[in-house]
Amino acid sequence: MSAAQWDVTVLGGGVVGRCLALLLARQRLRVALVERCATATGAAEVDVRAYALNAASRALLREAQAWPADRHATPVRAMWVADTDHDVAGSPQPVATLRFDAPAPQEPLAWIVDVAALEQALEAAVERTRGIERLHGEADTAPRAALTVVCEGRHSSTRAAAGIAWEAVPYPHTALAARLRCARPHGAVARQWFHGEEIIALLPLDGVDGDRVALVWSVPRARAERLLKLAPEAFAAELQAACGAALGDMALESAVAGWPLQRALARPWVRPGLALAGDAAHAMHPLAGQGLNTGLGDVAELVRVLREREYWRPLGDLRLLRRYERARAAPVAAMLAATDALHGLFADPNARVTALRRWGLRAVDRLEPLKRWFIQQASGQLATL
């Protein structure tokens, strides 16, 4: 197919790029999906991350026919959050806690999805979908189309080449990710501990009766460097101590990955014939687990704007693309501000801030209407997400 025959070129073969390509192809648009060439470095590195996906993201992926099998998408029936302090023996103890329970077993708070399984489901869907041509190479060799959507991630070369500003503020922390097996089953509960500058999240895997968890541990950079050098047994022991052995003995079942954290936003998101989506447009702290949900929210809105455009308006029309940018500006800004504020609130060592934070956790835990509102927000049921 010649370059003139493409309607949309999608740059980036990650979750956001593939989901977008699938949904645009369902509109009978001709899509070129440009993925980076694989490097010949031997066996592919296993991705140890897991995504917390809300109801809106699940519905979008199901529409794209790319939701993974049940064993790879564990429903979260409860979320437990603790603000901790060390006791006289140096062990972490919850000082204030907050628990959200799902309204019903068939209405989970979220789903914890294995990254590899989700990517495999998207791969299979792309392979069987007509209207998508897969190309491999760099962005500068991508075919021209009426619209190019950049889904290359936060280090996008296309965004930089277009002269779009990337306003990034690094956090002084590194996120660590790994998989662990625990002595006790997780009970389909997502657990999170806040202790000073550290945030620990244990996300349930392998179904409601599973005993494996995905770890996301945000720590100061110097401590991250030390943790990354530990032997598997020592790392598991340190984590077990940090979360008060909530799930009993823990054994590391994967390598430990680490990456620096930042808050970032591209300005603008659109140019004539060009739009950004996902991590190419924004980056946020993982403490709320909303990074991919926000990226898939970009996909849903861009698909809607293109589907509802006037019949005479070109796909790359700047006025059309600004509808997408305006629709996403407020929810993305709100999510960036919320995650940044939460991080600042829990990292602040001031005694008055600490007391107020713990009072707030206890108050929310006692107010069912407020808890229901938070559940709706986290599940993607309200427009603000």
Image: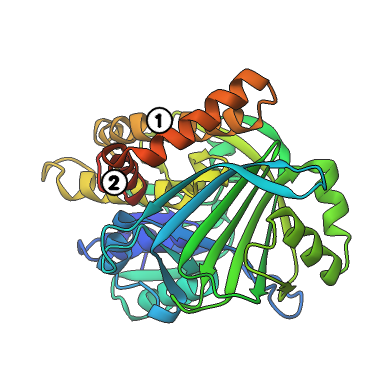
Question: Local crowd at mark 2 within 10 Å, few (<14), some, or many (≥20)?
Answer: some
Residue 230 found in image quarter: bottom right
Answer above or below: position of 216 versus 134.
above
Residue 68 image offset from top left, x and y in percent: 40, 76
Measuring 41% from the left and 33% from the top, which residue is drawn there? 363
What secondary structure is marked by label 1? helix
Q: How is the image coloured?
A: rainbow
Q: How many marks?
A: 2
What secondary structure is marked by label 2? helix
Measuring 75% from the left and 64% from the top, which residue is drawn there? 256
**Viewer-side residue, 250 vs 65:** 250
**Viewer-side residue, 89 vs 187:** 89
**Which disc number belongs to residue 244?**
none
Tell me: 88 left or right of 120: right
Question: Local crowd at mark 1 within 10 Å, few (<14), some, or many (≥20)?
Answer: few
Q: Amino acid at mark 1?
A: Ala
**Which disc number belongs to residue 376?**
2
Confirm whether residue 313 shows in the render: yes
Residue that label 1 marks: 334
Q: Amino acid at mark 2?
A: Gln
Measuring 25% from the left and 42% from the top, which residue is drawn there? 382
Residue 21 image offset from top left, x and y in percent: 35, 62
Answer above or below: position of 48 versus 364.
below
Answer above or below: position of 161 versus 141.
above
Q: CA distance from mark 1 to mark 2?
A: 15 Å
